[in-house]
Amino acid sequence: MREAKRQRGNSFSPLDPTSSEPIYRQIYWRFQRAITDGALSPGQRIPAARALAKELGLARGTVDTAYSLLTAEGYIQSRGQAGTVVTPGLKVRTTSAHVQPSDGPGAIASIRPKASILPFQMALPALDVFPRKIWAQLGARCIRTTRIQDMANPSVYGLDSLRSAIATYLQVARGITCLPAQVFVTSGYRNTLALVSHTLLQPGDQVLIEDPGYPPTRQLLDHLQMQIACVPVDQDGMLVTQGINDWPYARAAVVTPAHQSPLSVSLSLPRRLELLEWAARQQAWVIEDDYDGEYRYISRPLPALKSLDLDGRVLYTGTFSKVLFPGIRLSYLVVPAAQVERFEHVSQAFLGGCPELTQAIVATFMTEGHFARHIQRMRKLYGERREAVARGLKQALGDHISLDAQPGGMHLILRLTQPQSDRALVERLLQAGLYAEALSDCCIASQSHSGLMLGFANIDSQATAAQLGKRILALL
Amino acid sequence: MREAKRQRGNSFSPLDPTSSEPIYRQIYWRFQRAITDGALSPGQRIPAARALAKELGLARGTVDTAYSLLTAEGYIQSRGQAGTVVTPGLKVRTTSAHVQPSDGPGAIASIRPKASILPFQMALPALDVFPRKIWAQLGARCIRTTRIQDMANPSVYGLDSLRSAIATYLQVARGITCLPAQVFVTSGYRNTLALVSHTLLQPGDQVLIEDPGYPPTRQLLDHLQMQIACVPVDQDGMLVTQGINDWPYARAAVVTPAHQSPLSVSLSLPRRLELLEWAARQQAWVIEDDYDGEYRYISRPLPALKSLDLDGRVLYTGTFSKVLFPGIRLSYLVVPAAQVERFEHVSQAFLGGCPELTQAIVATFMTEGHFARHIQRMRKLYGERREAVARGLKQALGDHISLDAQPGGMHLILRLTQPQSDRALVERLLQAGLYAEALSDCCIASQSHSGLMLGFANIDSQATAAQLGKRILALL
């Protein structure tokens, strides 16, 4: 308490009631500065809000507000009876050019963990080889040639030129025949899945999902109050027969047929047909999440499940996050022709449309042929990197691990020969500056999978992978 | 039927079963071409799907698919027993450089109504005076200086620099004190409102909305299965007392305090306080839609309702659509400090984040001072244009109309002295190439308002307005 008092004295001497900065914000800044300065250290106790308010002659609420901001920002933590402390383990980036409170709110950013790219980062294409120069040229051209009518409200369905380019691309690359009017441009997979749910499903509807599966799918459906129906996955993808038998009233299924997320296996043709037949019979919907169908290395990319959809039951979702870059925030949905009107209607209520500029750049990138070339180059590169990283890891980790034989995707699955918690290992890796995700975090009902998922697209050689493998070995 | 047969003969001779283009798509293109060529005219009957399938030796489903696409695209309409006809009144843009089916799906765009800007277009800033050169320079710079880490997954909450710039701006311009961590960048008002609903409300919750009000608010809440509670509006805004008495269990209220949408009146201070007190007492939420609070012409802009929010019950939503341009698709939400964590949690499930590039351009535009300058110039310009357009309309329409005295906003409300349907008039105006919206389309329970809403921001002089007024007069 004495320590806290001293700090408080230091921190609060210049409180200024005549300042345009409200008092609670001044308090916030003083603490923020004291913490980033190192005057208050992680774990150190700070005065109780009531005591501080009394001391400063302020309303209790003023100090509470400051404290709740500090808590929300992660600077401090309440420990109940034990008082309030500076967050233990808080990593503060102290710099010599320290941000002053007078710089305003921007100062906060300085201690937030900066989004940096770690080795083995998942779902991240090889950004080092992205054709940035061409991209910047197209971008500058698109901005320069923006017409006044392009600045008005964009179509909520997407830019016509982009919808056309996507339809053409899907025909060639994924065997999907559709018209531009069936293509809806969205701002990401979550946005797409929410649009499908709002258009075709009701809260309480049963939805089949893969287990293990992609956690955001489950999270979003949960939030939308769908009833999650977990279906196990084997080496041929979702166990369709079991799923439709166990959940006879399911209204939809979300699947990742090209490379099952996370196991990267492909849904076999008999199961694809069974799923489509089920959907037609039950008038249910199949949502095909084709997040990286382009990246298959052992043979040509499989045609999309959607290409077999004769009954108009498949909603196809694709994204530019993996084939261009995630920061672009552009995805798309292909709906059956007969559903176009329903989707247009709901889009009017839910979507605002995506930025015209981003759409224009992507459309130009596609129609001028850069897109197809880029994907082709990446497919070759990823095939090589995948091979190199697998060899490097095996070289360093030997019998401690086995690697799944996957036909495609952008990550490797590394299984540990000696049973241990993959979650705990992921924690240790992150602390050591290496990225990984735990396979068991993708499991819902089934807890049968354990292992590490490692993105390989940004690792450029076997030697690098072997070095990283050694760092993993040290943490096993 | 004979006529249809002739056309069909013309259109279908070159069907090619060996083409890579599926048959249904070939049928689609033939009809599309026949219609755009004028070979089939609006209102003309086309063969029944069954008959056409038989004639061509195709499965019925193949023709059905083509027809449903044509229907979805608006080319044809089913008239039940009376058969299927080319959509009556269909406006076809025939050009000499006609798009061939071999050009692929892009051809469709050629007959879609092109988004052009009509006189009196609503919710559209004065795009003619937007600083496009500066914008293009900043944009080119932002693309050129994109770093690899900027291409990775963006923060779902928004770019740090943009959140800071917004927080700073809101302090100065709207009297709102908040930290960047309280600011969530979204892709539009609908996106914002959906985020708030998912985070703080449950399906079935009662939500107070203004009547007349902004139709998308009602639409979206409807879709999210909220219970809509309509509250009338007078010259001081929403009748708060009546609303909270009539709906004692309401969980939230959506209001447009600066310039009520559509009436443009301001919510009076006593009602603001009453609303805040109600929210604090009931632990309810107030969603402040401040879509154009900057544009007030008779005095300084009013501080936002949020600036009075001592209890952390107000969710503030702002947008760049009106102060920059709608095509940018960028909005934001300010949440109470104590709700930051909840919103971060739900954002992770719902939002994908907005494109890094657009956010970076806007942040630079703000921090380099262009934003404040632009708003200041627009406020002055809109004040002048509003005055000029009001005078021009009055000059042309005289006693046929009265104009509401509104303190701000981007549209005028024109009431008709002789009672007549505002909806029917809007239809006639649109046919004559003039934009307007009907006030009665904003009414829900109350049907007490009738009149035209006319956007004035893009009309540059009294003379132009008087000319347009004469065209309105001719249609009264």
Image (tube, coloured by chain):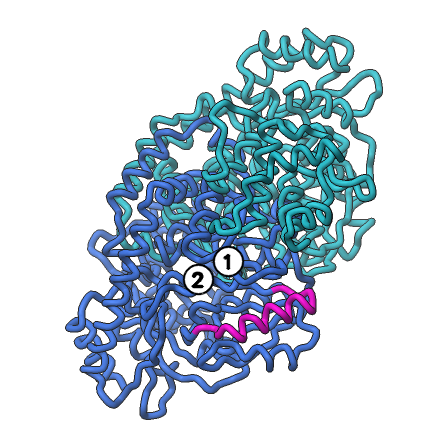
Chain colours: A cyan, B blue
Earlier sequence position, callout 1 versus callout 2: 2
Crowding at label 2, few (<14), some or many (≥20) Cα neighbours within 10 Å? many
Query: Measured along the vertical axis of the image, is residue A76 above or below residue B465?
Result: above
Tell me the CA gap for discs 1 and 2: 7 Å
Task: Specify the segment rendered in magenta.
Answer: B266-285
Query: Could you tell me if the residues under marks 1 and 2 are in contact, i.e. CB atoms within 8 Å?
Result: yes
Q: Which amino acid does label 2 sit on?
A: Tyr
Going 46% across and 37% down the picture, which residue do you hit? A172
The image quadrant that residue A452 belongs to is top right
- Label 2, secondary structure: give it: loop
Residue closest to the far bottom: B418
- Residue at mark 1: chain: B
Q: Which residue: 26% across, 42% down?
A: B134
- Image x and y of residue A314, in percent: 60, 50
In the depicted structure, whether residue A48 falls above or below residue A35: below
What amino acid type is highlighted by mark number 1?
Answer: Thr
Let me know if residue A353 appears in the view.
yes
Q: Nearer the viewer, residue B65 or A103?
A: A103
Find residue B88 and report its image quarter: bottom left
> Does B433 sit left or right of A13 as displayed?
left
* Residue beneath disc 2: B291
Residue B386 position, x and y percent, is: 27, 70
* Secondary-structure class at tag 1: strand
Residue B24 or residue B435, whichever sits in front:
B435
Labelled disc at residue B317:
1
Q: Mark 2 lies on which chain?
A: B
